[in-house]
Each structure stands twice: as C-alpha cells, then as structure tokens.
Amino acid sequence: RERCRLFSMSPGCPCFHLLALLPANPPRTITSCSAQTSLFGRPGNLQPRHRWGGYKSDRRRSAACSSDVDNFASSRRFYLEAPAVFKPFIGEGYRATLKTELVPGKIWGFEQSQELGALAVNIRSVAALLPSGDLWVHAPLFPTEEYLDQLLSLNRTIAHVVLPTYALEHKIPMSSFLRLLGDRQAARPKLWAVGDTWSFPVNLPLKWLGIPVDGIIGEDHIPWRDHIEFEVLKIADVGNPFVEAVFFHKDTKSLIVTDVVYSVPQDPPEIIPIDLLLEVAPDNPNVKAQDSMDTRRRAWAKMALLVAFFIPARQRIVEGGKAEWKEGYMESFEMIKDRLLVSPILQKLVFEKASTIVQAWIEKISKWEFEYVIPAHYAAPIKGGPSQVKQAFSFAYEDDSPSQLPEEDMRTLNDLGEIVQSVGKKDAADTVYGKLFDKFFKNLFIKKRGWNGDD
C-alpha cells in the first residue's frame, strides 16, 4: 500500500522511464502563442520568461500574440479542484500550453509544465485523427483557455476521450476538462477509462469524482478499436494496482503510452520555465548560476536524475534544505538520455516483481507494427518499434547483460526494490518500516553513500 501511494503520481513520477534511440524529427510545427513569443531555450538570444509562461523576446510578435501579461495569465489559468502534490497543490494555478504537430495532419501534442518545488517535467496530451474526421484525445491536460483554444483550432469534433491510467496527474484534470469542453462543443465526447482506478486517501468511484465514464477499456465495446488498438497492463500484487492502457494508432503506426516508457532529451523541453532551470542549476546552492544553454542543460540533467532515481548519488540536501551536487552527475545523465527507457522507479518497485505479467503484455503489443512511440512525458515522437520496446524491458526477461543504468544512482532504488520483493513473505510486514528507514530515509537525510569517499 505504501508502495502504491508512491505512484499516485506516476514519470513523471515520473514517473518519471533499454536500447539507445534518438528522437525522430518529422516535420514539427509549433503553433502555440507562447512559442511564437518566446525563445524556449534557444542559445544565442537568451532572455527571461515571465513566471507563468509569457516570455520576453526580440522576435517579431504576431497580431494574435500581442496581448499583455495579464491576458497571458488569464488564458493560462486553471483550478485544481482536489489536493495534489504538484503546483498549485489546490486552487488557482497557471500553465502555458505548447501545441506541436507530432505526425503531420494526423497526431498533435499539447504540453504543459508540471512542477513540484523547483522540479518540473513536461506532461503531454495527444489528439489523434480518426477516419471519421473526429478526434480521439489521450489524457487531456488542465483545461486552460489557451489549451482548449489550441485543441479546438484543429476544427474537428472531439468525439472520444481516454483516461489511460490511475495516476493522479492524468486523472485529476478530467472532470473540469469535460465540463469546460462541453461549454464550447455541441456534444460531450465519450469517455473511456481503464478499470481499477483508485484514489487516496478515500477510494471513490470515478463518477463521484465528477468523471462520467461511458465505458471501461478492455471490458466494454469500444467503437474506435478498429483504428486504435489497445492493451492493458495491470499489476495488482500488493495493495492498489498499477494500471495503464497503451494504444496503437494504426494509420500512423504510432504507439501512444503514458508512463511505461519514455526518452529523456538532452535539452530541456521548450515548455519548462527557465527560472526553474536557473534555480536548480548551481552545483553550489550559494552561488547563482549565469544563464546559458550549458547552464540550462546541466539543470535539466539534475531534474531528470531526480525524477528517475529519487536520490541521485551525487546530490544531497545541505543546511537550509538546499541541494548540493558533486561533479559526475552529467556522466549519469549521459547513461539515461536520448534512448527508450523504462522508469527506474517503476522497474525496481513494480515491474521486476511482476515479470511474468510484464512479459505477457510485451508479447501482445509486440504484434503491432508500430514505428514511433509517443509518451506523455519528455521527448516525442521517438523512433522505435516492438524490438526496441522489448529491449527496454529486458530486465523482465532476466537478461544477464550488465545494467545500462548508473550503478551508484540505482543504490536507493535497489534497496527499495529489495523491500518490495519481501512484501508478502512471512513476517515481512513487521520489518518493512524499519527497512524503509534504514535503506531509504537514512540515505536521504542522514548519510550519503559514495559522497566524498564515504562507504
């Protein structure tokens, strides 16, 4: 149960997710207002962004993007209707949205920045074209005016919406998205959700959370299945289950996933605020970082390592609650970037214990002839087919080849994995919290192995 609480946010919890693959570069059109008026981290012309996603730039602004900061803020406002572990935690918040064309004329991506403290990761919704001309929307984002404008600018009816996972960050926007979309579209789209979703601390059915489900993926008749196939991965060995449906868009040969795999790009996604990058950039928290492309890349590397490993080997908390970094973390980042990757967190704490279930699921999706992978976080689209996805899950096949993950950074997750593996064995419950303290919390707050030569 405690393990599952850990994944109430999943990339990003990433969930924030083993054959090396470079992101593909099909034609990619950036059409958001924020993209036209901002640099999004381009070197050679670096200027600060406004905190809520407006930007200062010497680029020529289009007439549609000549609004002042207040109008930008208004179009990017949303309301978090239930407590969450990401900003704004509850109540009013602001997010910019970036619209991209992932497969020309067929699939579009919409990205926002999901933030916790100084950490940020992009979160993506996907809209795919059906043969009918209608849209199928995967894991919608918080419905800011900007996001809905971009989605409706495709001039298509949104006929179907999918809730592909139990994870909080993908579930909590759904109620307000459907409600506000209903104010701007004649007919409410059909909502298709995975089964066995759950909430914490009180486990309530989706309809009690204001999410009107029309059908359960894998149980009810799905009218779009001839065009978008799906398989559900469910692991319910302890407590509440891990559940995610993945989808094969036949027309574009694209595998659409949420959290099961991802590819961390070398450069920070364009939607990540620069001020957050500059906040985490210094190795010494008492020295202010100067803005440059190299500074932003090093900051992004730190964010990605924290999301992947919880407690990277070369980072520790010092007096004042600030993070200090030791040289060598870029070598760890090099081992996880620009390749198809299963989240180390999910690998150690969920998938390794259920390798038989994972293998069966992999064999099913390997029958699809997909050529691209489109995840809900980090880079997209990623060039890769069934063999590359299967290689990313090689740990589930008890592959004897050396791990492609940095050994020192994996120490804490390996310790936690041992605890998870012990759950369910006789007398394990009496010692699990002692193990958690000894292996995890002590490593976080009291001692740092591998730091300054310590054992």
Image (spheres, rainbow, N blue to C red):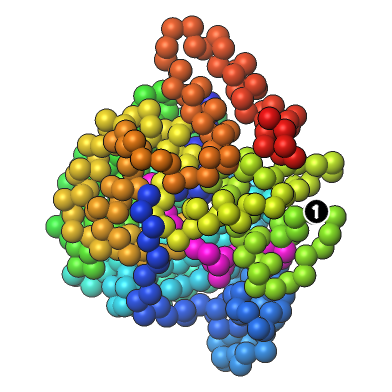
Q: Is residue 299 above or below residue 60?
A: above
Crowding at dot 1, Cα within 10 Å, few <14 / some 14-19 / many 20+, comes out as: some
- 268 in magenta: yes
- The quarter of the displayed image where residue 395 is located: top left
Identity of the residue drawn at 46% across and 73% down: 99
What amino acid is at disc 1? Pro
Give SS at disc 1.
loop
Nearer to the camera, 325 or 201: 325
**Which residues make up the magenta segment?**
258-278
Nearer to the camera, 12 or 130: 12
Is residue 261 among the parts visible in the rendering?
no
- 127 in magenta: no
Is residue 199 among the parts visible in the rendering?
yes
Q: In the shown orientation, is residue 376 left or right of residue 161? A: right
Identity of the residue drawn at 50% across and 48% down: 16
Q: Among all residues in the image, which is located at the extreme front? A: 453
Identity of the residue drawn at 18% across and 59% down: 369
Q: In the shown orientation, is residue 353 left or right of residue 99? A: left
Q: Position of residue 273 (x, y in %)?
A: 64, 66
The rendered magenta stretch, by its main secondary structure, is classed as: loop
Identity of the residue drawn at 57% across and 61% down: 113
Quadrant location, the C terminus: top right
Q: Is residue 127 above or below residue 368?
A: below
Q: Is residue 339 above or below residue 171?
A: below
Q: In the shown orientation, is residue 226 left or right of residue 191? A: left
- The quarter of the displayed image where residue 75 is located: bottom right
